[in-house]
Amino acid sequence: MSNIFFSIIIATYNCPHELNKTLNSFLHISIKDKYEILIQDGSPSMDTVAVAENYSNLPIKVEHCQDSGIYDAWNKALQRASGEWVLFMGAGDIFCHKDSLLNVMKHLENIPQIYDYYAVPVEVVLPSYEFLNTISPSKKPTIDLKDGMCIPHQGLFHRRKLFKSNNFDIQYKIAGDYEFVCRTLTKNNFFPAKEPCVRMPVGGISSSLSFMSQREAEFIKISRHFYPKKIPTKLILRFIFWKCINTVSFILGKENACFLADIPRILQNKPRLWSRHHPPSPLSKLSHPPSIAICIATINRITELNRLLYSLTQQPVANFHIYLADQNVPGTLDPILRRYTELPITHIMLPSKGVSTARNALLSLVREEDIIVFPDDDCWYAPDTLTQAVEAFQRHPEAGAVMGRSFSQPSAAPAVGQDSRVSQIGTFKNGETYLQFFRAEVVKDLRFDPRLGPGTGLPYGCGEDTDYLLEAHKRAPVWRCPSIRVFHPSPDTHVPSDAKIASYAAGRMYLLKKHAFPLWFRYANVLYPLCMLPLDALRKGRKAARYRWRMFVERLRHFSS
């Protein structure tokens, strides 16, 4: 007979950082040899598996394979379960204290065999694990279930025999646990308890308001199936409410929508959930001196690359390493590399498949550097650029990225301005790669979107740099620091070809949709070239006017794509 009392199932998808927090909480629990951890990972990479391998002292079994969603993953994991009781935890969930699981086990050892469910309250916490509120299971679930899931699954222990003849229905993407409970729970097999066992962070919930209306839609479908004689009034009203919130988010932006979503909680004197300010997680202190990874992707710019490398020889900061992705014909850069043997350069050859692919290849080479920067191969640095970047991070220790200012010539550099924090819209408007300096701690697992940028063969001929900065902005604040000077040639004055105009427009509109910018801002981006057309026609002539018209047409064409 198995000695395993608990089978704890964790389905994961691209969440190595959150899983690390969950597994770390197992190190401190007071029971040993009474549980197994079954990780079902559907991630395309092996990062999650690598995290689990760091906990070889825990009874972990990992299966890495593709699945069709969380409930399919749970079904797969259940086939490997051997414990008497099953608990489903999410990556990021932790135990309330070291004796939490022990206390549950003591109760379960003594409850009658008729009980297939044992439900405990769940503590809801912020991403920092600051307490927010407690969700208690319903004492009358067979009555309350018609209005939705009244038992949080992180606090619901299932007797494993329930799954001998029942699986989760994988047609549901959000409410499969609700459907399972409606199908298997009775008046006589449910035992509610009072002591919490698991803490559930709400990090990231406000970034997916659409989740709520989708959830309520599935709840309504399930409720109507199991309770056909009862109208789920509360579910219908919640569905309408969240649909309205989604509409506000689409038109006016997420910030306004989150505030409206919290109004019912404010009226009930409950703490804010959606619009609550979540301070960024504190970053570790920079090493002294900090090390810098300089990642350069280059093709067909020999003279310009020479200028950039020469500017790096003039930096008083010496603690940097250059990672160079060469997409030229083999041997093209050999004379330059021989010229700069004093520079620490890791040189790799890559086929010409786009700047995003090249930068991702370089990111995989980055070691333990503290700061990562992606200079264009035609830009160059002022003698104090790296020094100023380091000092900017020291002034703003919470920053995930700092941005400099661009100048066409060293002699044209104006007086230094003041640092300023950059909003999401400000990040979108000023996202040139060569101006961005990142804390490696924030972006070490972040990759460039291979669909964006020049050289991909796809319609989106720009935006890979802005996209990367927007993703970093979601994780930590971004600051603009004018003291960081980067030199870059002025944009060509000739009018781009129609094909290039179309690729620029496609990339811009793709980014606006991908990052859920409000509808008004998307419309403003479409109409801006049209508004500028008369002015450019008067100042610059017919070619400039035609450029504005073509840009308007292409942005409008890609508005909904």
Image (cartoon, rainbow, N blue to C red):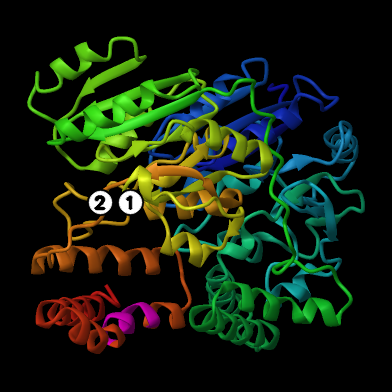
Q: Quadrant of the N terminus?
A: top right
Task: Give the residue displayed 76% in from the left and 71% down from the top.
Answer: 142
Q: Which mark is residue 464?
A: 1
- The image quarter containing residue 307 is top left
Residue 381 among those drawn in magenta: no
Q: Which mark is residue 418?
A: none
Q: Quadrant of the C terminus?
A: bottom left
Task: Give the residue displayed 35% in from the left and 15% down from the top.
Answer: 343
The majority secondary structure of the magenta stretch comes to helix
- The image quarter containing residue 520 is bottom left
Is 453 placed above or below 5 here? below
SS for tag 1? helix
Please report contact status of discs 1 and 2: CB closer than 8 Å, yes or no.
yes
Residue 63's spot in the image, x, y percent? 47, 30
Judge left or right: residue 189 versus residue 517. Answer: right
SS for tag 2? loop
179 or 509, which lies in front? 509
Task: Please give the range of residues in magenta.
Answer: 524-530
Instruction: Name the amino acid, label 1.
Output: Glu
Residue 526 among those drawn in magenta: yes
- Other residues around mark 1 within 10 Å, as few (<14) / some (14–19) / many (≥20): many
Q: CA separation, marks 1 and 2? A: 5 Å
Q: Which mark is residue 453?
A: 2
Instruction: Name the amino acid, label 2.
Output: Gly
Judge left or right: residue 117 versus residue 167. Answer: right
Task: Give the residue displayed 75% in from the left and 31% down from the top.
Answer: 25
Q: Could you tell me how many numbered marks the image carries?
A: 2
Residue 231's spot in the image, x, y percent? 65, 89
Task: Give the residue displayed 48% in from the left and 37% down from the top.
Answer: 41
Residue 102's spot in the image, x, y percent? 87, 32
Q: Earlier in the sequence, mark 1 or mark 2?
A: 2
